[in-house]
Image: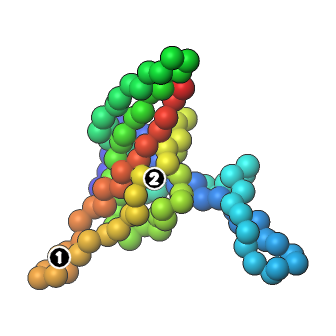
């Protein structure tokens, strides 16, 4: 697929922090995540909603990432579309048709909260 008018979409993955004493990974470091472009991907609008309380107004935005079925994306990754970063809202899976073996483009739900 080629999207001549699309924006570049990137996957961000936190680097792991290692506990030297326990010799195991203990946390994710988002201060400088690993970032790679996702080829043939785009982000599409799903919905927005507004939540208002006595001292806060928050906008919740839901979008969907459409990407190749074999691209490495995990539930804890983040997606950057231009200057906006979204969190993955679910477990990304690539379904395969049991009769033909065909795997369609994946749709992965994304969310972002502002306010």
Query: Which quadrant of the figure contains the N terminus?
Result: bottom left
What residue is disc 2 on? 88
Q: Is residue 36 visible?
A: no
* Residue 108 pos. (x, y %): 36, 55
Count neighbours of disc 1 (C-alpha within 10 A) and say few if under 14, some if 14 to 19, many if 20 or more: few
Asked if residue 89 lies left or right of residue 45, the reply is: right
Residue in the image at 37% along x and 40% along y? 62
On the image, which quarter does residue 22 sit in?
bottom right
What residue is disc 1 on? 97
Name the one closer to the observer, 65 or 53: 53
Looking at the image, is mark 1 or mark 2 earlier in the sequence?
2
Element class at badge 1: loop
Asked if residue 107 lies left or right of residue 24, the reply is: left
On the image, which quarter does residue 111 sit in?
top left
* Residue 26 pos. (x, y %): 73, 69
The mark found on residue 89 in the picture is none
């Amino acid at each position: 697929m080629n999207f001549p008018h699309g924006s570049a979409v990137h996957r961000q993955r936190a680097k792991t922090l290692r506990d030297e004493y326990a010799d195991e990974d203990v946390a994710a470091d988002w201060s400088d995540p690993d970032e790679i472009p996702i080829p043939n991907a785009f982000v599409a609008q799903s919905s927005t909603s507004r939540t208002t309380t006595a001292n806060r107004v928050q906008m919740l935005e839901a979008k969907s990432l459409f990407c190749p079925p074999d691209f490495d994306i995990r539930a804890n990754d983040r997606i950057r579309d231009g200057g906006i970063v979204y969190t993955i809202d679910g477990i990304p899976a690539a379904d395969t048709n049991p009769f033909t073996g065909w795997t369609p483009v994946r749709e992965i739900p994304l969310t972002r909260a502002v306010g």
